[in-house]
Image: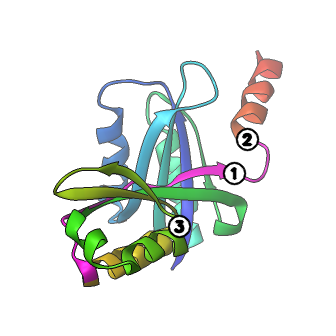
Amino acid sequence: MKEFTISIFSENKTGLLTRIVSVFTRRHINVESLTVSKSSLKGIHRFTIVIKQEEESVRKLVAQLEKQVDVIKAFYYHPHEVVHQEIALYKVPTQAFSNDDRVEELIRAHHARILSIEPEYIVVEKTGHAEETEALLKEFESIGIYEFVRSGRVAIVKPMEQLNAYLKSLEHVY
């Protein structure tokens, strides 16, 4: 199985997330990551979904997604076709910093930054790929960690956004 990033462009309608997720569920496809936000086009939202699947299955999935009402267009991409990041937040005990210079060295070595310093804990932010945020988590686990959370993937495709080309092609039809 290979990793694919799926971009779905849609109107922002209530219940659409449920319908999109149900397409994955019916096909027994596990979602590794899911992020939804507005896109660069006014009134259009973008779903970024990461899955591990065979390409033929992904091709059929994207065709099924496009049949959903309110979905404008869906695309899938191989890993080399996207630039992506995730963000992770770590809540680490404050005493870990006062007892060990190693924590500050870890933050620098992992290109992370401190967001908040509280009496009981410090919140650290790390952006990068899942493997990078996971590596820092493992380091913090050895020192002590209260909480960890990682976002889903946000991705920009390397080819020019296909949605714009698709919408322009519709202008010629109408």
Q: Position of residue 49 (x, y in %)?
A: 47, 53
Labels 2 and 3 touching (C-beta < 8 A): no
Query: What separation in Å lies between label 2 and label 3 (alpha carbons)?
Result: 22 Å
Amino acid type indicated by mark 3? His
Q: In the rendering, which numbered label is found on residue 157?
A: 1
Residue 10 is situated, as x and y percent measured from the top left of the image, at: 51, 31
Q: Residues within 10 Å of mark 1 (few under 14, many from 20)?
A: some
Disc assigned to residue 129? 3
Task: Specify the color scheme.
Answer: rainbow
Asked if the magenta segment contains residue 134, the reply would be: no
In-image side of 51 versus 81 (left or right) = left
SS of the residue at dot 3?
A: loop
Q: Nearer the viewer, residue 106 or 160?
A: 106
Q: Nearer the viewer, mark 2 or mark 3?
A: 3
Give the mark, 2 or 3, whose residue is nearer the N terminus.
3
Residue farthest toward the right in the current orientation of the protein: 172
